Image (tube, coloured by chain):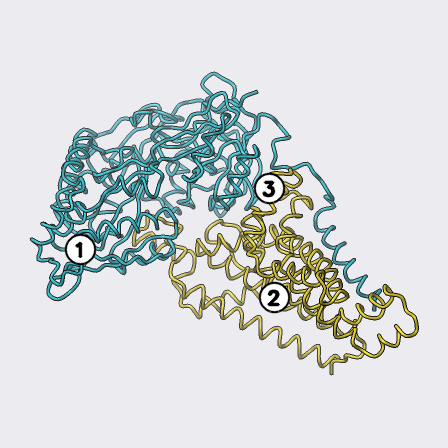
Amino acid sequence: MKRRSFVFFTMLLILALVLSGCNWWNKSDSNSKEGSNREVIVGLVSEPDSVDIHRTSSTGEANIPLYDTLLKLDNDGNIIPNLITDYEVVGDGKEVIFNLKENAVFHSGKPVNAEAVKLSFERLVASSPFSTNAGEIDNIEVLSEFSFKIKWKNQFAPFFINATTPFLAPLDVSVLDDKGEGFEKNPSGSGPLKLKEINRGDSLVYEPYKDFDWKGQKPGFDSVKFRFIPDEETRILEFKKGNVDVLLNVPYQYIEDLEKDSEVTIKRVPGDVLSYLGWNNKLPIFQDVNVRQAIALAIDRDSIIDNTLNGEAQAVFGPLPKAAFGYSEKIETMATDKYTRDTGAAKKLLSEAGWKDINKDGVVMKDGEEFSVDLWVDDDPANQRAAQVIQSQLMEIGIKITISVKEAATIIEQTPNGAHEMLLWSFGWPDADVLNFLLFGKDKSKRLHYENEKIYSILEKGAIEMDQEARLKLYEKAQEMLVEESPFVPLYVKENITAIRNFESFEIHPIEGSIEWTSVKVKE
Amino acid sequence: MSSYLVKRIFTMMITILGVSVLVFMIIHLIPGNPINHILGDFATEESIRELEIRLGLDRSIPVQYFSYMLNAIQGDLGTSYITGYTVVEEILNRIPITAQLALFSMVFGSITGIVIGVIAAVKKNTIYDQLAMLLALVGISAPGFWIALFLILLFSYQLNIFPISGYNGFYSLVLPSITLGLGTAGSIARMTRSSMLDVIKQDYIRTAKAKGAGVYRLIFRHSLQNALIPVVTLIGMQFGYLMAGAVVTETVFALPGLGSLIVSAISTRDIPTVQGLLLFMAAMIIIVNFVVDLLYTKLDPRIQYE
């Protein structure tokens, strides 16, 4: 019996050791910095769903550098050439001729020419759920090796800004299998980083792509490893220990501590994601514009930012964040003047709408009903704290809020059906067309359910107006109306906080918020 | 024995079938769906419809279930909606890490638990016994993430002995195995102690003592070997606990195993991956328990299955 037990445990141990690949007591740690001293290790929360940009909406630092975009944004947010050197809008604006630069090459070694771009667009249109970003393409014609023409069924003005995102970046279809799949195992884009190793659930390893345009210089690093470390504490400890060089999305509570370390630099870039307090505008309780304006007037953004985000966000009053095309300083000033916190004015508006604190319990009532709504918030602790501050601020004007914490997947599924009353949510897109396709377009208002013929007719015009100046004017008009109608309360844009160590130079694009790999130089 | 085997295998199949129905129902009942995750804010009615057809989600739930089970029987657990990899590929890719973690934890938990249990039983009602049982209680009740962070801070961050996170062979699995194995060690220690105390009271121990058997012979030859039978059963039953614990441990230590895969699959509502993983884990637990039951007859020849 003794022998049997001994054999049982010994076999367990042997099996475990065999499974570990005989890597007994191997102290060399692939995740430490003992290897190449020009290796950059980036710590991220989660792995992208896929590196195939036609198959996922989950884009981030770990898959964006695989792609080079057709156009790009400069540091002031202007659209400038990239893979496309120039373009010409033809006739009524339904056709545009694009010219490509002639020396771009995919990671597979094949040229990024008109035929390759056409095939990439055809795959996007035929099989990608994100084809709406390209508009309704009628056909694509190759005019010469580096020139092609896209014809749309209707004019599609957001194309140019969308072409600055990886969603429309060309991918090399020659690496796909006969079913048009398999990109995630053999990816080939034309971006600054070429994928070298895929370790599912653990890391993606890239090397600088030698044929990329490095602005006349050599890449300032030898390889980049994106490590996926879901636990916040572990991620921070890896950075503090020096095993991670770039820590993205630093949790706010750790910033002060990291700033004390003289070797660490904190980079702050305003994000392009606007957090907002929204509600189901179809509900009778939100029909009166006085009520909607009263809610907007009751909110103190600075208090939310200070109490929940350690002050690391910028208050926003207008409908668009500064990073989006269509943002207007004039609108922002107008909205700030109109909705800077004033609880007296808010109470007055509620009273005009018939909501009064009849039984003096602090909650306003109308027709025997209390003003009580359920606020949905996701499981992000910072958002939950923000919801509590909002709850307290709205209570000051007599609106009672109950908070319901729900999984993001549940909120995304149920809000288009109008199952919610109020929600704390966000959106981020570089073009004002987001007001149309997501927030206020006809039958497209997924979270806010706001219907206003005048507003969405302007937004529809904005989507087909090819003259950019005229387009800006249309969006300014739509935003003016939105500020007046107050169908939601824009709150803030969080700062993207990145902590770095051991770099001679390291830049983050001020508008897009992504790492500029051409600027990265590791300290020797 | 053979009729017992047939009966057990039949019961196992029914159990796995029951698990598959339950898993299928739960994953379809919880709010949220993969379409919304994949499309994000770009969802239009048309794109939702197209994707539903492509993923086969336009079919009725029973049709989806039978089609899934038909493929599963042939070893095809489907393709992830989110990553494009087949579920079998994902499992094969990650199972070595979870298997190592579970085995190391089991070895650590068993050895530590038995040693602590024996000390507690032999030194009954002394300070050693109380200390051993306190340790066992801590092992059982301390949350995994807390133990993990404590170990990381001490052995990785301060003493620089082990890596903080990630996978690189045995060395990187030491702290996760201790984290996961502590709960098992606690349960085994308590079981070993009580089982040892029962055995120590037996007449044959008194006889052996009277015949002049030494302390070590008494403990290891006469007491422990008999006390181990319920302990081995418990070790088998701990496999399910280890699988569940791997979810937290793999997340904290950033290990790319099945536990971390299931967390991401649930959050993205990746139905084929969740179904495939849960089915696989359930099958593993059922099989391990079956093997332990068979082992039981080997450890104690008096036990016969009819």
Q: Is residue B165 visible?
A: no
Label 2, secondary structure: give it: helix
Q: Nearer the viewer, mark 3 or mark 2?
A: 3
Q: Three-letter amino acid code at disc 3?
A: Ile
Q: Is residue A411 above or below residue A148?
A: below
Q: Nearer the viewer, mark 3 or mark 1?
A: 1
Q: Is residue A361 above or below residue A114?
A: below
Answer with left or right where residue B198 lies relative to residue A473: right
Residue picked out by circle 3: B164
Please identify the quadrant where the C terminus of chain A is shown. top right
Q: Is residue A50 visible?
A: yes
- Chain A, chosen colour in render: cyan
Label 3, secondary structure: give it: loop
Residue A483 appears at what percent x and percent y?
A: 15, 41
Residue farthest along the front direction in this orientation? B126
- Towards the viewer: A425 or A253: A253
Residue A282 appears at what percent x and percent y?
A: 18, 57
Q: Which chain did the renderer colour yellow?
A: B
Q: Which mark is residue A389?
A: none
Number of marks drawn: 3
Label 1 Cα neighbours within 10 Å, binned few <14 / some 14-19 / many ≥20: many
Residue B168 quadrant: top right
Residue picked out by circle 2: B283
User: Which residue appears at 29% of the width and 50% of the height?
Assistant: A424
Residue picked out by circle 1: A398
Label 1, secondary structure: give it: loop
Residue B271 appears at what percent x and percent y?
A: 46, 59
Label 2 Cα neighbours within 10 Å, binned few <14 / some 14-19 / many ≥20: some
Q: Three-letter amino acid code at disc 2?
A: Ala
Do circles 3 and 2 both sit on a common chain?
Answer: yes
Name which of mark 3 and mark 2 comes first in the sequence: 3
